[in-house]
Amino acid sequence: MAGVFDRLVGQDAVESELTAAAIAARAGVVEGAMTHSWLFTGPPGSGRSIAALCFAAALQCTDAGTPGCGKCHACTTTMAGTHGDVRRVVPEGLSISTKEMREIVQVASRRPSTGRWQVVVIEDADRLTEAAGNVLLKVVEEPPDRTVFLLCAPSVDPEDISVTLRSRCRHVHLVAPSVPAIAQVLKERDKLDEKTANWAASVSGGHVGRARRLATDEEARARRQRALALVAAVARPGAAYAAADELVKAADDEAKQMSAARDEREREELATALGAGGTGKGAASATRGSAGVLKDLERRQKSRATRTGRDALDRALIDVAGVYRDALAVRFGAASAGSGVTLTHPDLSDQIHDLADRVRPEGLLRSIEAVLACREALDLNVKPRFAVAAMVAAIMAAQSA
């Protein structure tokens, strides 16, 4: 019978571990297989937040059979994000603030109202500020009896999650799904033809969501092409910086496009809540002092747009790094037939082989390092245009040496 864990792709070992933990939790055994704090790690697209949400559903599941049936009211509301005892912390800005974490901890300390547990799913726990992490650490060290914390982060590196917080959690690592597994999902769940599914899976970098977007969204395919065009433009200094500016602009445009409708809806809802359009005696006083509330909304929307743009630009940079990685693999014969190493961009095989012939291995390696340095600069809030321009200059220098 299909259950919530069917949403995971290529994670059989994780499914078994989480199912065993949910069974132990149902039996009241909060030790060994089950614990109050979990840390889900894995590369982008591996499904760490989906795994955490599926586990939350399994913990709340009311079906008499295996936890996580996917059909009972507890499972369906958890997966839909409407269960009263499951809180999802999804950072919309660049970080998770102390104030936000204190509010979540306060709610998490209550007893469950309808479910078996109070479950808190913290997506992108690597965005916790140091102070917010300390707030969470205090409650994780002495958790309420019926509360479970599920943290998601890229890795257990101290840059992603503090050592003390990681030490209080049981670690579940997810792997990047294989190309055949992703293609199978696209064919079965999205009803895509075999050719499209195989292509999208092969260029997705093991990211199920991105494979789906590339297969179904023409604009997503266009953004990928713009990013990869930067690699060819580097060979022509006059075009390189123009391509860099286009890359940054495309990320900004994507962020604006994704945010516009939501921003407008939030402004309208807030205006209505503040009494906009009212004509009664209290209409004027209801809107008095609303400037601060509106300013706070604008601040949050700006932070969300900044993060969306940075994420879009980061995806493009990963694509660019993938081309140089492929060329380096070709140069050393690691991507030859039967080697077991596949290209990140198999549809660009001719361009990659040309790059491998043209640029020395040292230049390819330094090109990858330049992309990684750009990503680090963006994390440090360097202006995207300056960071990408510096990356282009470093790549040109590396390939001309």
Image (cartoon, rainbow, N blue to C red):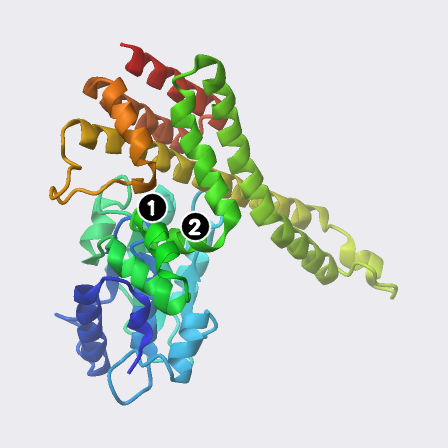
Q: Label 1 neighbourhood size at 10 Å, few (<14), some (14-19), many (20+)?
A: many
Q: Label 2 neighbourhood size at 10 Å, few (<14), some (14-19), many (20+)?
A: many
Say whether residue 264 is visible.
yes
Q: Quadrant of the C terminus?
A: top left
Image position, residue 53 (x, y; %): 35, 66
Image position, residue 387 (x, y; %): 43, 24
Residue occupying image coordinates x 26% and y 60%:
181
Who is closer to the viewer here, 164 or 38? 38
Image position, residue 99 (x, y; %): 47, 51
Residue reaching furthest to the bottom: 64
Q: Quadrant of residue 326?
A: top left
Image position, residue 345 (x, y; %): 31, 40
Q: Amino acid at mark 2?
A: Leu
Q: Quadrant of residue 287?
A: bottom right
Element type at marker 1?
A: loop
Residue where numbered disc 1 is placed: 203
Say whether residue 117 is visible.
no
Residue where numbered disc 2 is placed: 214
Q: Quadrant of residue 320?
A: top left
With 57 as the anchor, is 357 left or right in this view? left
Q: Amino acid at mark 1?
A: Val
Contact between labelled residues 2 and 1, with CB atoms less than 8 Å apart: yes
Mark 1 and mark 2: span between their CA atoms? 9 Å
